[in-house]
Amino acid sequence: MTDNPSVRAAEARELSDSEYLRQLGVEPKFKRALGFFTGSLFAVAFQGPTTGALLITGATLAIGGPAFIWAIPIIFALQLLLALTWAELSSHYPLTGGIYQWARQLGGDFLGWITGLFYVVAIVLVMPAVGTVMNVVLSGLFTSLTITLSHQVIISILTALAAGVLIATSVRVVAILNSIGVVLELLVLLGAAVGLLFHQHQSLSVLGSTASVQGHGSYLWPFLVVVALVVTQLVGFETAGAFAEETNKSRIKPSQAIIAGLAGTAIVLFIFDLALLLAIPNVGKAMADPNMIPDVLTSALGSGFAKLFFAGAIVSVFSTAIATLATIVRMIYGMARNGQLPGSGFLTKLSPSTDEPLGTILVAVVLSILPLIFIKRIPVIVAAITALIIIPYILVFGALLVRRLQGWPRSAAQFSLGKWGLPITVAGLVWTVIILWDAAWPRTITNPHLGPLPVIEDLAIGCLIVGLIWWFVSLRNKPDPEGAAAIDQSARE
């Protein structure tokens, strides 16, 4: 291929998905069964608007008052910096494993390894959180049902096992089931919002009310806590890029799906929370009500609709479980294919009938169940999930900034930021550092003590120690296995 950048860009555009993949050092093995729509819904499912609403909305109202809602558009605008960046990286490197692959291509094997490790640990911890929300949903649907700690563990395990069985069938089946679940979720949330708008008890002025949560101080401090919580609902949209090798038009459709996944989740969350706030009969009582959402739905729309909401929530939460577990599988597979995990041969062997990595699926299910040993502490551990995802974000943005200053990219991708690449990278890096600082600030609700240090520091230091040990003991001088994705030399010039 010629060294002329414009010619290289034209040649790259003419290559098929499979030919482009081979140029990155990977032999195509997966069926391309996904598109823009299914990829976008995977991203929405991973973020889980219903799951986030049930876990987060009550807390954000209690901490920030009704004005908490303005955190959603503010965070969306800033997270869009990340989405645009991930979209360009996905277009350059449409590889299974998403952000792990982007880090490896930009910064080499070590950066890829650390990024992948932090990201996998974070999304593994999402699965017990999803199981916890499933128990909340079942309690809301069957109000007379008493769910004990043992029941919660069993339901969480069954959720992970069922998701694993479905993922083992084929990506096409998973995509169809996930799409049905997410569409139903969006219809239920928007249907609830429309119904609530016909039962308003508050005027629009309530959206500017802080309900005096700041006392005699500045509203900035409770709002920062709100930001740390709301961000948890708007991360993970980059997972659409983890399925790139299974997506048609893989150098553009996953990029579009990443942006659409973020935008769709943010819009639906804002509409639902807006309608919910306007339908609250008494703001003060709602702020102290741990069952705020079901109580408002019941008072406004009746117990029948509240039951319907929770019935739909079961499907939507299970869609989140499927999308999360499928992402874990793709991350592990991508790392194993590069020889960065033990048992790589077992993890990368595809089923001849389904083209799915059954060994990786089994490992992903087991890893998802292991944290349930600490079920009493799961709500505490969940507080660290966002921070553990943001750390890889910072690593990739740091490597990307260095490469951009060195002239990356040498050739254009089908999704390109052009001259906006550098300022967006700088702004995105600053924003991710702010998010991590905010989430890691020692406070009971977002970063409580699990051991001698706050939970985020405990888990981050633990991941770093394990990562460094494994790197120096096993990976430092280990050559890539045959067929591993080659590192883009143009990124390292």
Image: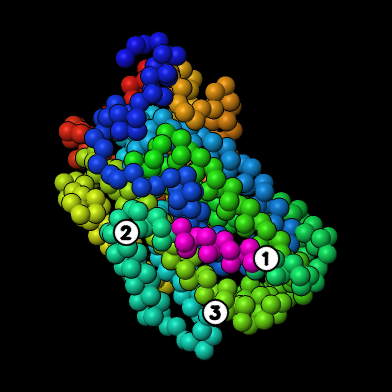
- Residue at the bottom extreme? 144
Q: Amino acid at mark 1?
A: Ala
Q: Nearer the viewer, residue 80 or 380?
A: 80
The residue indicated by pointer 2 is 167
Q: Residue at x 43, y 66 (%)?
A: 318
Q: Write down the quadrant of residue 54 in the picture.
A: bottom right
The location of residue 387, given as percent across then percent down, is: 48, 50
Question: Of helix, strand and loop, which one carries label 1?
Answer: helix
Q: Which mark is residue 140?
A: 3
Can residue 14 be seen at all in this image of the molecule? yes
Q: Residue at x 40, y 10 (%)?
A: 4
In this view, 230 is above or below 422: below
Mark 3 vs mark 2: which is more N-terminal? Answer: 3
Q: Is 325 included in the stretch rendered in magenta?
A: no
Q: Which residues are magenta?
A: 179-191
Report whether 302 appears left or right of 426: right
Question: Of helix, strand and loop, which one carries label 3?
Answer: helix
Q: Residue at x 34, y 71 (%)?
A: 157
The residue indicated by pointer 1 is 193
The location of residue 163, given as percent across then percent down, is: 35, 64
Task: Count residues near mark 2 (Cα–Cα under 10 Å), then give few for <14, some for 14-19, many for 20+.
Answer: many
Q: Which mark is residue 64?
A: none
Q: CA distance from mark 2 to mark 1?
A: 32 Å
Helix, strand or loop: magenta stretch: helix
Q: CA distance from mark 3 to mark 2?
A: 28 Å
Mark 1 vs mark 3: which is more N-terminal? Answer: 3
Count of number-bearing discs: 3
Quadrant holding the N terminus = top left
